Amino acid sequence: MTKNTKKPWQGRFSEETDKFVESFTSSIDFDKRLYSYDIQGTVAHSMMLKSIGILSDSELKEILSALVKVEKKIEKDQIVWEDSLEDIHMHIEHELIELIGDTAKKIHTGRSRNDQVATDIRLYVRDEIIEVFDNIVLLQKTLIKLADKYSNSIIPGFTHLQIAQPITFGFIMMAWFFMLERDKSRFIDSYKRVNISPLGSGALSGSSHELDRNYVAKLLEFDSVTDNALDSVSDRDFIIEFISNSSLLMSHLSRFSEEIIIWCSTMYNFVELEDKVCTGSSIMPQKKNPDVLELIRGKTGSVYGQLMNILTIMKAQPFAYNRDNQEDKPALFTSVDTVLMCLNAMNVCLENLNLNEEITEISSKKGYSTATDFADYLVKRNVPFRDAHEIVGKAVGYAISKKVGLEELTLKEYQDISSKIEEDIFDYLNVKGSVDSKKTIGGTSREEVKRQIKVAKNIIKEYEKN
Ligand code: ARG
């Protein structure tokens, strides 16, 4: 049964809207997701209208109880969504009019869909910032667990994907922790710019009614009200910021994915993901693939795409509101859904990751990974670093020609290279010794990584207090 969907603007029009135009301009398919925020906004706006005498006590009561009914109806999926009613705002108003008639027709006093939608999405983004933040924390907790578990596990550290210096797996987990910490701080910093009420800006120029914008803001738990109506109804900076922060977060998740994918490959075999988080091949029976991680890496493109999408939507709009803005929601919702799903996916993979510690330790000895330690050894014996670099380079060349590792050369061979070298050189060539010598703040020594883990745990403890 189709509803009596008389449009609120019908007065000026002499013919019905073309069906194609109706479906082309409708946003209800996606913006119905904002229903609870739209209702919150309407509750606050109505309470304010009552406070300034536009609604009576009994009218307000009628509206509030009708809003509860509408919300329940939506939750029970009993609403027929119609393109002719365009969006969530008009559907809710329509439902109210069906329920309580003329009283409902007063709720749009001093309000436009332009400030209404701006309010709805600010309320929505505010919640999603917290949701993303909480999910980042879950991932960080998993990283701390892995850092604790593998704090003694040696693994090669790479630059240019060539073995560079030995590090620990715990050290890598902490690197990821602090990357995510920056993501959190970006999201939280953006919160204060989101949490400002545009309601009461009207279509673009404010209102001739004596709207109490501060009261509405207080009811909706906004920190303050926006200062300029023209800006308020056209501003989507906070969506750009959210998607930009999401893009950077996705870039981090994608890098973690890439790294684990490499570690899982047969040639590296550094880590093993449990069967339950891997998928197989339809033709090659032996295959076990890290598809979840590949999908995180792949989905990163979709969030980057939404960033370009929202930036382009905004770039040439004249003030104030234009219908282009309606396209902000698919961009925003896609980003929110992708980020939350990928955070969860990464967490599941990390919870099911096992390090092949013997292999990583053996690999960490390859590629002359302690050559810098050897140079530092010479520096401590008063050889200038540049000369030390050259001496060690020669030693590495010699070891390569003999097809042996640095620790396999004899003391005699070393002393032929430099008279400064003594028996204790072998302590420096050993990967554990190398790791533990990196005691600088931020270094990979086990002692220092313990400190980093402590800092990380304190960050989580602080968060859990609030
Ligand atoms: N559905 C619209 C949007 O999402 C609501 C605002 C419509 N305003 C207007 N003046 N047509 O942007």
Image (cartoon, rainbow, N blue to C red):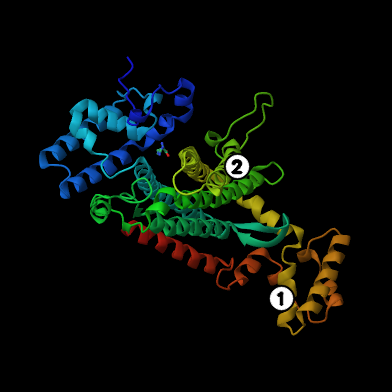
Residue furthest out toward the left: 58
Q: Position of residue 460 (x, y in %)?
A: 40, 58
Q: Secondary structure at mark 2?
A: helix
What's the distance in space between the residues labelled 2 and 1, CA to CA?
Answer: 43 Å
Residue corresponding to mark 2: 301
Q: Earlier in the sequence, mark 2 or mark 1?
A: 2
Question: Is residue 179 at least partly visible in the picture?
Answer: yes
Residue on which the image places disc 1: 376
Looking at the image, is mark 2 or mark 1 nearer the viewer? Answer: 2
Mark 2 Cβ and ligand 1 under 8 Å apart: no
Position of residue 426 relative to residue 194, above or below, is below
Closer to the camera in the image, 11 or 8: 11
Identify which amino acid the numbered label 1 is placed on.
Asp
Above or below: residue 396 compared with residue 124: below
**Element carrying mark 1:** helix
Q: Is residue 424 visible?
A: no
Compare residues 115 and 408 and report the one nearer the observer: 115
Label 2, residues with CA under 10 Å away: few <14, some 14-19, many ≥20: some
Q: Is residue 181 left or right of residue 360?
A: left
In what quadrant does ligand 1 lie? Answer: top left
